[in-house]
Protein backbone atom coordinates (compact mmCIF):
# COMPACT_ATOMS: atom_id res chain seq x y z
CA UNK A 1 0.00 0.00 0.00
CA UNK A 2 1.11 3.57 -0.59
CA UNK A 3 2.21 5.31 2.63
CA UNK A 4 -0.15 8.01 3.86
CA UNK A 5 2.14 10.89 2.91
CA UNK A 6 1.85 10.04 -0.77
CA UNK A 7 -1.83 10.88 -0.73
CA UNK A 8 -1.03 14.60 -0.53
CA UNK A 9 -1.14 15.85 -4.11
CA UNK A 10 0.31 19.32 -3.46
CA UNK A 11 -1.02 21.97 -5.81
CA UNK A 12 -1.05 25.74 -5.69
CA UNK A 13 -4.61 26.68 -6.48
CA UNK A 14 -5.32 30.12 -7.84
CA UNK A 15 -1.90 30.69 -9.39
CA UNK A 16 -1.90 31.72 -13.04
CA UNK A 17 0.86 30.27 -15.22
CA UNK A 18 3.47 32.95 -15.72
CA UNK A 19 5.24 31.35 -18.61
CA UNK A 20 4.16 29.06 -21.44
CA UNK A 21 5.30 25.47 -21.16
CA UNK A 22 8.23 24.95 -23.49
CA UNK A 23 7.81 21.32 -24.46
CA UNK A 24 5.27 18.56 -23.95
CA UNK A 25 5.85 14.87 -23.78
CA UNK A 26 6.41 13.60 -27.30
CA UNK A 27 4.53 10.75 -28.86
CA UNK A 28 0.96 11.36 -27.71
CA UNK A 29 -1.89 9.23 -28.96
CA UNK A 30 -4.53 10.65 -31.27
CA UNK A 31 -7.10 7.86 -30.89
CA UNK A 32 -10.09 8.38 -28.57
CA UNK A 33 -9.50 7.48 -24.94
CA UNK A 34 -11.91 5.35 -22.97
CA UNK A 35 -12.60 7.23 -19.71
CA UNK A 36 -11.67 5.40 -16.53
CA UNK A 37 -14.51 4.02 -14.49
CA UNK A 38 -14.52 4.83 -10.78
CA UNK A 39 -13.38 1.32 -9.90
CA UNK A 40 -10.41 1.66 -12.25
CA UNK A 41 -9.26 5.06 -10.96
CA UNK A 42 -5.95 4.78 -9.10
CA UNK A 43 -5.04 7.09 -6.21
CA UNK A 44 -3.18 10.37 -6.73
CA UNK A 45 0.42 10.05 -7.79
CA UNK A 46 2.85 10.20 -4.84
CA UNK A 47 4.52 13.63 -4.85
CA UNK A 48 7.71 14.49 -2.99
CA UNK A 49 11.10 15.90 -3.95
CA UNK A 50 13.76 13.48 -2.68
CA UNK A 51 17.21 14.72 -3.58
CA UNK A 52 20.85 14.57 -2.57
CA UNK A 53 23.69 16.98 -3.19
CA UNK A 54 26.77 15.64 -4.97
CA UNK A 55 29.74 17.87 -4.10
CA UNK A 56 32.71 18.04 -6.41
CA UNK A 57 34.67 20.61 -4.35
CA UNK A 58 37.53 18.91 -2.50
CA UNK A 59 36.27 15.61 -4.02
CA UNK A 60 33.70 15.28 -1.21
CA UNK A 61 31.30 13.12 -3.24
CA UNK A 62 32.48 12.83 -6.83
CA UNK A 63 34.90 11.99 -8.22
CA UNK A 64 36.32 10.29 -5.12
CA UNK A 65 39.75 11.70 -5.95
CA UNK A 66 41.37 13.62 -8.79
CA UNK A 67 43.31 11.87 -11.55
CA UNK A 68 40.76 9.11 -12.09
CA UNK A 69 40.45 8.34 -15.78
CA UNK A 70 37.20 8.90 -17.64
CA UNK A 71 35.99 5.32 -17.23
CA UNK A 72 36.60 5.41 -13.48
CA UNK A 73 34.79 8.74 -13.12
CA UNK A 74 31.87 7.44 -15.11
CA UNK A 75 31.70 4.25 -13.07
CA UNK A 76 31.51 6.28 -9.86
CA UNK A 77 28.78 8.50 -11.32
CA UNK A 78 26.76 5.45 -12.37
CA UNK A 79 27.14 3.95 -8.90
CA UNK A 80 25.77 7.15 -7.33
CA UNK A 81 22.82 7.26 -9.71
CA UNK A 82 22.10 3.56 -9.23
CA UNK A 83 22.07 4.06 -5.45
CA UNK A 84 19.78 7.07 -5.86
CA UNK A 85 17.40 5.01 -7.99
CA UNK A 86 17.49 2.09 -5.53
CA UNK A 87 16.61 4.50 -2.70
CA UNK A 88 13.70 5.97 -4.72
CA UNK A 89 15.32 9.40 -4.86
CA UNK A 90 14.16 11.48 -7.81
CA UNK A 91 16.76 14.27 -8.10
CA UNK A 92 20.51 14.76 -7.87
CA UNK A 93 22.01 18.22 -7.28
CA UNK A 94 25.42 18.09 -8.93
CA UNK A 95 28.04 20.75 -8.20
CA UNK A 96 29.19 21.91 -11.63
CA UNK A 97 31.02 25.13 -10.65
CA UNK A 98 33.03 24.72 -7.42
CA UNK A 99 35.36 27.74 -7.65
CA UNK A 100 34.88 29.74 -10.86
CA UNK A 101 35.77 26.56 -12.75
CA UNK A 102 33.79 23.84 -14.48
CA UNK A 103 33.20 20.11 -14.41
CA UNK A 104 31.91 20.39 -17.99
CA UNK A 105 33.29 21.62 -21.30
CA UNK A 106 33.24 25.43 -21.02
CA UNK A 107 34.63 28.22 -23.15
CA UNK A 108 34.20 30.66 -20.27
CA UNK A 109 35.93 28.99 -17.32
CA UNK A 110 38.61 26.28 -17.00
CA UNK A 111 38.20 22.64 -16.16
CA UNK A 112 38.10 22.04 -12.41
CA UNK A 113 41.16 20.54 -10.79
CA UNK A 114 38.93 18.06 -8.96
CA UNK A 115 38.58 16.09 -12.19
CA UNK A 116 42.09 15.57 -13.57
CA UNK A 117 44.23 17.01 -10.77
CA UNK A 118 45.13 20.31 -12.42
CA UNK A 119 42.92 23.26 -13.23
CA UNK A 120 42.41 23.56 -16.98
CA UNK A 121 43.13 19.88 -17.63
CA UNK A 122 40.29 17.92 -19.23
CA UNK A 123 39.35 14.36 -18.22
CA UNK A 124 41.27 11.66 -20.04
CA UNK A 125 40.15 10.23 -22.35
CA UNK A 126 38.12 13.34 -23.11
CA UNK A 127 34.42 13.36 -22.32
CA UNK A 128 31.92 15.90 -21.01
CA UNK A 129 30.98 14.92 -17.43
CA UNK A 130 27.86 17.06 -17.20
CA UNK A 131 26.48 15.68 -20.44
CA UNK A 132 27.17 12.18 -19.11
CA UNK A 133 25.48 12.89 -15.76
CA UNK A 134 22.39 14.36 -17.43
CA UNK A 135 21.97 11.43 -19.81
CA UNK A 136 22.50 8.81 -17.11
CA UNK A 137 20.18 10.55 -14.64
CA UNK A 138 17.38 10.92 -17.16
CA UNK A 139 17.74 7.30 -18.23
CA UNK A 140 16.80 6.41 -14.65
CA UNK A 141 13.96 8.93 -14.37
CA UNK A 142 16.04 11.16 -12.07
CA UNK A 143 16.22 14.93 -12.40
CA UNK A 144 19.64 16.59 -12.67
CA UNK A 145 19.98 20.00 -11.00
CA UNK A 146 23.16 21.92 -11.88
CA UNK A 147 24.65 23.48 -8.73
CA UNK A 148 26.74 26.64 -9.05
CA UNK A 149 28.75 28.53 -6.48
CA UNK A 150 28.05 32.11 -7.57
CA UNK A 151 31.07 33.99 -6.16
CA UNK A 152 33.84 31.74 -4.82
CA UNK A 153 36.94 31.99 -7.00
CA UNK A 154 39.51 29.86 -5.21
CA UNK A 155 40.48 28.28 -1.89
CA UNK A 156 43.97 28.10 -0.47
CA UNK A 157 43.48 24.34 -0.25
CA UNK A 158 43.49 24.16 -4.04
CA UNK A 159 46.28 21.87 -5.22
CA UNK A 160 47.17 23.27 -8.63
CA UNK A 161 47.99 26.60 -10.22
CA UNK A 162 45.18 28.64 -11.71
CA UNK A 163 44.64 28.21 -15.43
CA UNK A 164 45.28 31.15 -17.78
CA UNK A 165 41.52 31.53 -18.42
CA UNK A 166 40.56 31.58 -14.73
CA UNK A 167 39.01 34.84 -13.59
CA UNK A 168 41.91 35.50 -11.20
CA UNK A 169 44.02 35.90 -14.34
CA UNK A 170 41.53 37.28 -16.87
CA UNK A 171 40.03 39.94 -14.57
CA UNK A 172 41.96 40.06 -11.29
CA UNK A 173 40.51 43.45 -10.30
CA UNK A 174 37.14 41.89 -9.49
CA UNK A 175 38.62 39.15 -7.29
CA UNK A 176 39.45 39.93 -3.65
CA UNK A 177 41.35 37.92 -1.06
CA UNK A 178 39.39 37.20 2.08
CA UNK A 179 41.18 34.94 4.53
CA UNK A 180 41.77 31.59 2.86
CA UNK A 181 39.58 32.45 -0.12
CA UNK A 182 39.74 34.42 -3.32
CA UNK A 183 36.26 35.84 -3.84
CA UNK A 184 34.50 37.43 -6.78
CA UNK A 185 33.32 40.80 -5.44
CA UNK A 186 29.48 40.96 -5.64
CA UNK A 187 29.75 44.74 -5.99
CA UNK A 188 31.66 44.44 -9.26
CA UNK A 189 29.36 44.28 -12.32
CA UNK A 190 31.94 42.19 -14.19
CA UNK A 191 31.80 39.52 -11.49
CA UNK A 192 28.01 39.32 -11.69
CA UNK A 193 28.20 39.19 -15.49
CA UNK A 194 30.66 36.29 -15.35
CA UNK A 195 28.33 34.28 -13.13
CA UNK A 196 25.31 35.06 -15.32
CA UNK A 197 27.22 34.15 -18.49
CA UNK A 198 28.31 30.84 -16.97
CA UNK A 199 24.84 29.85 -15.78
CA UNK A 200 23.01 30.80 -18.97
CA UNK A 201 25.64 29.00 -21.04
CA UNK A 202 24.87 25.79 -19.16
CA UNK A 203 21.10 26.33 -19.45
CA UNK A 204 21.42 26.73 -23.21
CA UNK A 205 23.76 23.80 -23.88
CA UNK A 206 22.67 21.12 -21.42
CA UNK A 207 19.35 19.42 -20.77
CA UNK A 208 19.37 20.17 -17.04
CA UNK A 209 16.19 20.32 -14.96
CA UNK A 210 17.15 23.14 -12.63
CA UNK A 211 19.81 25.68 -11.72
CA UNK A 212 20.77 25.55 -8.04
CA UNK A 213 22.93 27.98 -6.06
CA UNK A 214 24.16 27.51 -2.52
CA UNK A 215 24.63 29.71 0.56
CA UNK A 216 27.85 31.50 -0.43
CA UNK A 217 26.99 35.10 -1.30
CA UNK A 218 29.33 37.47 0.48
CA UNK A 219 31.75 35.12 2.25
CA UNK A 220 31.19 33.82 5.76
CA UNK A 221 32.98 36.13 8.19
CA UNK A 222 36.44 34.86 8.99
CA UNK A 223 35.65 33.83 12.57
CA UNK A 224 32.46 32.10 11.39
CA UNK A 225 34.00 30.33 8.42
CA UNK A 226 34.41 26.59 9.11
CA UNK A 227 37.83 25.06 8.65
CA UNK A 228 36.57 22.17 6.55
CA UNK A 229 36.71 23.32 2.93
CA UNK A 230 34.69 26.43 3.71
CA UNK A 231 31.61 24.30 4.23
CA UNK A 232 28.82 26.16 6.02
CA UNK A 233 27.43 22.84 7.21
CA UNK A 234 30.06 22.89 9.98
CA UNK A 235 28.49 25.94 11.65
CA UNK A 236 26.61 25.14 14.83
CA UNK A 237 24.25 28.12 14.56
CA UNK A 238 25.77 30.08 17.45
CA UNK A 239 27.56 32.54 15.17
CA UNK A 240 30.73 34.53 15.89
CA UNK A 241 31.34 38.24 15.47
CA UNK A 242 33.23 39.08 12.28
CA UNK A 243 36.74 40.46 12.68
CA UNK A 244 37.68 41.11 9.07
CA UNK A 245 35.77 43.37 6.68
CA UNK A 246 35.30 42.17 3.13
CA UNK A 247 37.61 44.33 0.96
CA UNK A 248 35.04 45.81 -1.44
CA UNK A 249 35.98 49.46 -0.92
CA UNK A 250 36.67 50.27 -4.62
CA UNK A 251 33.17 49.21 -5.68
CA UNK A 252 31.63 50.92 -2.63
CA UNK A 253 33.40 54.22 -3.35
CA UNK A 254 32.27 54.13 -6.99
CA UNK A 255 28.70 53.58 -5.78
CA UNK A 256 28.89 56.61 -3.48
CA UNK A 257 30.52 58.74 -6.17
CA UNK A 258 27.65 57.86 -8.48
CA UNK A 259 25.12 59.24 -6.03
CA UNK A 260 24.23 56.01 -4.23
CA UNK A 261 22.33 56.52 -0.97
CA UNK A 262 22.06 53.07 0.55
CA UNK A 263 24.10 52.24 3.63
CA UNK A 264 26.88 49.74 3.02
CA UNK A 265 25.02 46.68 4.33
CA UNK A 266 21.92 47.51 2.27
CA UNK A 267 24.08 48.12 -0.79
CA UNK A 268 25.69 44.72 -0.39
CA UNK A 269 22.28 43.05 -0.10
CA UNK A 270 21.13 44.93 -3.17
CA UNK A 271 24.11 43.63 -5.14
CA UNK A 272 23.07 40.08 -4.37
CA UNK A 273 19.36 40.77 -4.88
CA UNK A 274 19.93 42.09 -8.38
CA UNK A 275 21.88 38.99 -9.36
CA UNK A 276 19.18 36.68 -7.94
CA UNK A 277 16.43 38.49 -9.86
CA UNK A 278 18.48 38.46 -13.05
CA UNK A 279 19.14 34.72 -12.69
CA UNK A 280 15.47 33.93 -12.22
CA UNK A 281 14.38 35.94 -15.24
CA UNK A 282 17.31 34.97 -17.43
CA UNK A 283 16.98 31.23 -16.87
CA UNK A 284 13.28 31.22 -17.72
CA UNK A 285 13.82 33.43 -20.75
CA UNK A 286 16.12 30.71 -22.10
CA UNK A 287 14.04 27.66 -21.10
CA UNK A 288 10.74 28.14 -19.32
CA UNK A 289 10.79 24.64 -17.79
CA UNK A 290 14.20 24.93 -16.09
CA UNK A 291 13.59 25.74 -12.43
CA UNK A 292 15.74 27.95 -10.21
CA UNK A 293 16.48 26.97 -6.63
CA UNK A 294 18.48 28.49 -3.79
CA UNK A 295 19.85 26.81 -0.66
CA UNK A 296 20.58 29.57 1.86
CA UNK A 297 21.72 29.34 5.47
CA UNK A 298 18.83 28.07 7.56
CA UNK A 299 18.31 30.86 10.12
CA UNK A 300 16.28 33.89 9.10
CA UNK A 301 16.88 37.59 9.63
CA UNK A 302 17.05 38.66 13.29
CA UNK A 303 14.01 40.95 13.28
CA UNK A 304 11.68 38.15 12.11
CA UNK A 305 12.87 35.09 13.98
CA UNK A 306 10.50 33.04 16.11
CA UNK A 307 10.95 33.29 19.89
CA UNK A 308 13.90 31.24 21.10
CA UNK A 309 15.74 31.05 17.76
CA UNK A 310 19.28 32.40 17.99
CA UNK A 311 22.45 32.24 15.91
CA UNK A 312 24.33 33.43 12.89
CA UNK A 313 22.64 36.05 10.70
CA UNK A 314 22.99 35.56 6.97
CA UNK A 315 21.03 38.80 6.51
CA UNK A 316 23.66 40.86 8.36
CA UNK A 317 26.83 38.91 7.59
CA UNK A 318 26.31 37.17 4.23
CA UNK A 319 24.08 40.02 2.99
CA UNK A 320 21.53 37.47 1.83
CA UNK A 321 17.96 38.78 2.04
CA UNK A 322 16.48 35.33 1.53
CA UNK A 323 13.04 36.35 2.78
CA UNK A 324 12.84 38.94 0.01
CA UNK A 325 13.58 36.33 -2.68
CA UNK A 326 10.62 34.29 -1.51
CA UNK A 327 8.42 37.37 -1.19
CA UNK A 328 9.21 38.42 -4.77
CA UNK A 329 8.93 34.89 -6.18
CA UNK A 330 12.49 34.94 -7.54
CA UNK A 331 12.88 31.22 -6.87
CA UNK A 332 11.01 28.12 -7.94
CA UNK A 333 12.21 26.17 -4.94
CA UNK A 334 13.78 27.15 -1.66
CA UNK A 335 16.05 24.78 0.27
CA UNK A 336 17.07 26.33 3.59
CA UNK A 337 19.97 24.46 5.13
CA UNK A 338 18.31 23.22 8.31
CA UNK A 339 21.43 21.55 9.64
CA UNK A 340 20.31 21.23 13.27
CA UNK A 341 18.46 18.49 15.16
CA UNK A 342 14.81 18.49 16.13
CA UNK A 343 15.33 18.91 19.87
CA UNK A 344 17.51 21.91 20.83
CA UNK A 345 15.41 25.07 21.11
CA UNK A 346 17.91 27.60 19.75
CA UNK A 347 17.96 26.09 16.25
CA UNK A 348 15.10 23.59 16.39
CA UNK A 349 14.47 21.95 13.02
CA UNK A 350 10.63 22.11 13.20
CA UNK A 351 10.61 25.77 14.28
CA UNK A 352 12.97 26.82 11.49
CA UNK A 353 11.00 24.85 8.92
CA UNK A 354 7.77 26.52 10.00
CA UNK A 355 9.48 29.90 9.80
CA UNK A 356 10.45 29.48 6.16
CA UNK A 357 7.04 28.10 5.23
CA UNK A 358 5.54 31.29 6.64
CA UNK A 359 7.82 33.49 4.49
CA UNK A 360 6.44 32.05 1.25
CA UNK A 361 3.52 34.17 -0.06
CA UNK A 362 4.03 33.07 -3.68
CA UNK A 363 3.69 29.39 -2.80
CA UNK A 364 7.09 28.28 -4.10
CA UNK A 365 8.41 24.83 -3.23
CA UNK A 366 9.91 24.53 0.26
CA UNK A 367 12.40 21.64 0.24
CA UNK A 368 14.66 21.86 3.32
CA UNK A 369 18.22 20.59 3.37
CA UNK A 370 19.06 17.85 5.90
CA UNK A 371 22.56 17.34 7.32
CA UNK A 372 22.67 13.59 6.65
CA UNK A 373 26.49 13.62 6.52
CA UNK A 374 26.55 14.43 10.23
CA UNK A 375 25.80 10.74 10.81
CA UNK A 376 29.08 9.26 12.01
CA UNK A 377 30.81 12.65 12.20
CA UNK A 378 33.70 12.99 14.71
CA UNK A 379 31.67 15.40 16.86
CA UNK A 380 27.99 16.28 17.28
CA UNK A 381 27.11 13.29 15.15
CA UNK A 382 23.55 12.26 14.38
CA UNK A 383 21.95 8.90 14.81
CA UNK A 384 20.13 7.78 11.65
CA UNK A 385 16.77 8.20 13.38
CA UNK A 386 17.36 11.97 13.50
CA UNK A 387 17.20 12.13 9.70
CA UNK A 388 14.30 9.69 9.49
CA UNK A 389 12.36 11.83 11.96
CA UNK A 390 13.24 15.04 10.11
CA UNK A 391 11.76 13.51 6.97
CA UNK A 392 8.62 12.70 8.98
CA UNK A 393 8.43 16.23 10.42
CA UNK A 394 8.72 17.69 6.92
CA UNK A 395 5.95 15.45 5.65
CA UNK A 396 3.70 16.61 8.48
CA UNK A 397 3.79 20.12 6.95
CA UNK A 398 1.62 20.06 3.79
CA UNK A 399 3.39 23.13 2.39
CA UNK A 400 6.84 21.50 2.58
CA UNK A 401 6.84 18.94 -0.20
CA UNK A 402 10.32 17.47 -0.22
CA UNK A 403 13.86 17.59 1.12
CA UNK A 404 17.53 17.23 0.15
CA UNK A 405 20.33 15.27 1.81
CA UNK A 406 23.76 16.77 2.31
CA UNK A 407 25.45 14.86 0.95
CA UNK A 408 25.37 11.73 -1.17
CA UNK A 409 28.50 10.27 0.42
CA UNK A 410 26.57 9.40 3.61
CA UNK A 411 24.04 7.44 1.57
CA UNK A 412 26.73 5.76 -0.51
CA UNK A 413 28.56 4.67 2.65
CA UNK A 414 25.26 3.73 4.30
CA UNK A 415 26.50 5.28 7.53
CA UNK A 416 25.01 3.47 10.50
CA UNK A 417 22.51 1.94 8.10
CA UNK A 418 20.87 5.26 7.11
CA UNK A 419 20.36 4.27 3.47
CA UNK A 420 18.71 1.01 4.50
CA UNK A 421 16.47 2.76 7.00
CA UNK A 422 15.33 5.35 4.49
CA UNK A 423 14.62 2.73 1.86
CA UNK A 424 12.70 0.48 4.22
CA UNK A 425 10.72 3.12 6.11
CA UNK A 426 10.63 6.48 4.33
CA UNK A 427 11.10 5.69 0.64
CA UNK A 428 9.19 2.45 0.19
CA UNK A 429 8.08 3.45 -3.31
CA UNK A 430 8.86 6.04 -5.98
CA UNK A 431 7.41 9.55 -6.09
CA UNK A 432 7.02 12.29 -8.67
CA UNK A 433 8.61 15.68 -8.14
CA UNK A 434 5.88 18.20 -7.22
CA UNK A 435 4.64 20.25 -10.18
CA UNK A 436 5.50 23.95 -10.67
CA UNK A 437 2.25 25.40 -12.07
CA UNK A 438 3.46 29.01 -12.04
CA UNK A 439 5.84 28.05 -14.85
CA UNK A 440 3.17 26.29 -16.89
CA UNK A 441 0.20 24.07 -16.12
CA UNK A 442 -0.93 22.73 -19.47
CA UNK A 443 -1.38 18.99 -19.17
CA UNK A 444 0.55 16.70 -21.51
CA UNK A 445 -1.28 14.55 -24.00
CA UNK A 446 -2.31 10.93 -23.80
CA UNK A 447 0.56 8.43 -24.08
CA UNK A 448 0.66 5.69 -26.66
CA UNK A 449 0.95 2.44 -24.72
CA UNK A 450 0.14 -1.12 -25.66
CA UNK A 451 -0.04 -4.07 -23.26
CA UNK A 452 0.24 -7.81 -23.70
CA UNK A 453 -0.13 -10.64 -21.22
CA UNK A 454 2.93 -12.89 -20.82
CA UNK A 455 3.43 -16.00 -18.73
CA UNK A 456 4.38 -14.16 -15.54
CA UNK A 457 3.83 -10.48 -16.29
CA UNK A 458 1.94 -7.81 -18.14
CA UNK A 459 4.40 -6.21 -20.55
CA UNK A 460 3.98 -2.65 -21.79
CA UNK A 461 5.30 -1.17 -25.00
CA UNK A 462 5.82 2.57 -24.50
CA UNK A 463 6.28 5.12 -27.24
CA UNK A 464 9.37 6.98 -26.11
CA UNK A 465 8.90 10.66 -25.40
CA UNK A 466 11.42 13.38 -24.53
CA UNK A 467 14.48 12.31 -22.56
CA UNK A 468 13.36 14.21 -19.48
CA UNK A 469 9.66 13.32 -19.23
CA UNK A 470 8.13 10.37 -17.45
CA UNK A 471 5.35 7.82 -17.48
CA UNK A 472 3.37 7.29 -14.29
CA UNK A 473 2.27 3.65 -14.07
CA UNK A 474 -0.25 2.14 -11.67
CA UNK A 475 -0.93 -1.60 -11.36
CA UNK A 476 -3.77 -3.04 -9.27
CA UNK A 477 -3.66 -6.33 -7.40
CA UNK A 478 -7.14 -6.84 -5.98
CA UNK A 479 -7.73 -3.75 -3.86
CA UNK A 480 -4.07 -2.71 -3.74
CA UNK A 481 -2.61 -0.16 -6.17
CA UNK A 482 1.12 -0.04 -6.79
CA UNK A 483 2.92 2.90 -8.35
CA UNK A 484 5.96 3.06 -10.63
CA UNK A 485 7.76 5.73 -12.65
CA UNK A 486 9.31 5.02 -16.02
CA UNK A 487 11.58 7.45 -17.88
CA UNK A 488 10.10 8.34 -21.22
CA UNK A 489 13.19 7.04 -23.00
CA UNK A 490 12.12 3.56 -21.98
CA UNK A 491 10.31 1.50 -24.58
CA UNK A 492 9.63 -1.68 -22.61
CA UNK A 493 8.21 -1.96 -19.09
CA UNK A 494 7.17 -5.12 -17.29
CA UNK A 495 4.64 -5.51 -14.47
CA UNK A 496 5.41 -8.84 -12.81
CA UNK A 497 2.89 -11.11 -11.17
CA UNK A 498 2.86 -11.05 -7.39
CA UNK A 499 3.76 -14.31 -5.64
CA UNK A 500 0.75 -14.00 -3.30
CA UNK A 501 -1.73 -11.79 -5.15
CA UNK A 502 -1.22 -13.11 -8.66
CA UNK A 503 -1.43 -11.03 -11.82
CA UNK A 504 -2.28 -7.34 -11.96
CA UNK A 505 -5.95 -7.01 -12.87
CA UNK A 506 -5.66 -3.38 -14.03
CA UNK A 507 -2.87 -1.17 -15.40
CA UNK A 508 -3.22 2.58 -15.82
CA UNK A 509 -0.65 4.92 -17.42
CA UNK A 510 -0.32 8.71 -17.70
CA UNK A 511 2.30 11.07 -19.11
CA UNK A 512 4.20 13.53 -16.91
CA UNK A 513 5.84 16.56 -18.50
CA UNK A 514 9.02 18.42 -17.58
CA UNK A 515 7.25 20.57 -15.00
CA UNK A 516 5.62 17.64 -13.29
CA UNK A 517 2.18 18.14 -14.83
CA UNK A 518 0.29 14.88 -15.22
CA UNK A 519 -1.85 14.16 -18.26
CA UNK A 520 -4.98 12.08 -18.66
CA UNK A 521 -4.82 8.56 -17.27
CA UNK A 522 -5.43 5.68 -19.65
CA UNK A 523 -6.38 2.11 -18.78
CA UNK A 524 -4.15 -0.12 -20.87
CA UNK A 525 -4.95 -3.45 -19.21
CA UNK A 526 -7.37 -5.11 -19.50
CA UNK A 527 -7.57 -3.63 -22.95
CA UNK A 528 -10.45 -1.16 -23.41
Image (spheres, rainbow, N blue to C red):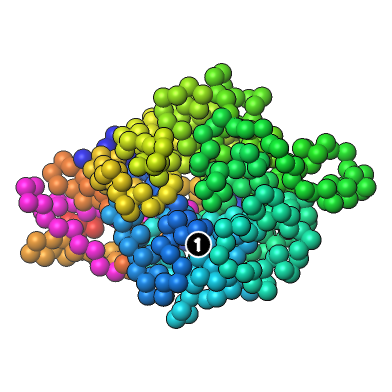
Of residues 140 and 517, the one drawn nearer to the viewer in this rendering: 140
Q: Where 29 sits versus 244, above or below?
A: below
Q: Nearer the viewer, residue 150 or 392?
A: 150
Which sits in the foreground, 48 or 69?
69
How many numbered marks, from 0 up?
A: 1
Residue projecting furthest to the bottom? 125
Residue 408 at what x, y percent from top left? Answer: 39, 52
Q: Is there any visible trace of residue 460 in the rendered image?
A: yes
Q: Is residue 139 left or right of residue 284?
A: left
Which percent across, then down, holds residue 521? 32, 52
Image quadrant for the C terminus?
A: bottom left
Neighbourhood count class around disc 1 (C-alpha, 10 Å): few under 14, some 14–19, many 20 upward: many
Taking 437 as reference, is 140 left or right?
left
Q: Quadrant of residue 86?
A: bottom left
Please tell me whether residue 508 belongs to the stretch shown in magenta. yes
Q: Quadrant of the N terminus?
A: top left
Question: Percent from the top left, x then y, of residue 42?
Answer: 26, 44
* Magenta segment: 491-515
Residue 41, percent from left and from top: 26, 44
Please tell me which residue is depicted at 72% across the width and 41% down the height of the picture.
Answer: 244
Q: Which residue is mark 1?
A: 208
Horizontal side of 401 relative to 480 (left or right) equals right
For label 1, the SS is loop
State whether residue 281 appears in this view: no
* x 67%, y 72%: residue: 165
Based on the picture, tell me whether residue 9 belongs to the magenta stretch.
no
Q: Is residue 25 above or below residue 359?
A: below
Which residue sits at x=48%, y=75%? Answer: 123
Residue 454 picture quarter = bottom left
Amino acid sequence: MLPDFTKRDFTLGGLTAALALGALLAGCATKPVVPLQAADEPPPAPRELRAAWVSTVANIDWPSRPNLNAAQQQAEAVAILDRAKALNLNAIVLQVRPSADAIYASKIEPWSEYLAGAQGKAPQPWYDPLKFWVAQAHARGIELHAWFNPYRARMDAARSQTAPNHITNTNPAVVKRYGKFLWMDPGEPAAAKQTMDVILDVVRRYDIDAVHIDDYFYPYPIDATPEVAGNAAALDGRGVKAQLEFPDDPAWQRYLAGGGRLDRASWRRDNVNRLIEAMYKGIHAEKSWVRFGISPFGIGRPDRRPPGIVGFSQYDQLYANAELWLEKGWVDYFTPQLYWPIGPRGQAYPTLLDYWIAQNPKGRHIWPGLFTSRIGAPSRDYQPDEIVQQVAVTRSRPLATGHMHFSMVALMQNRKGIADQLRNTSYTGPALVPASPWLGNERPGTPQVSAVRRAKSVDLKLKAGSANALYAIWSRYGSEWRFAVAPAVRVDWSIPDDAKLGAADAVVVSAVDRLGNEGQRVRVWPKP
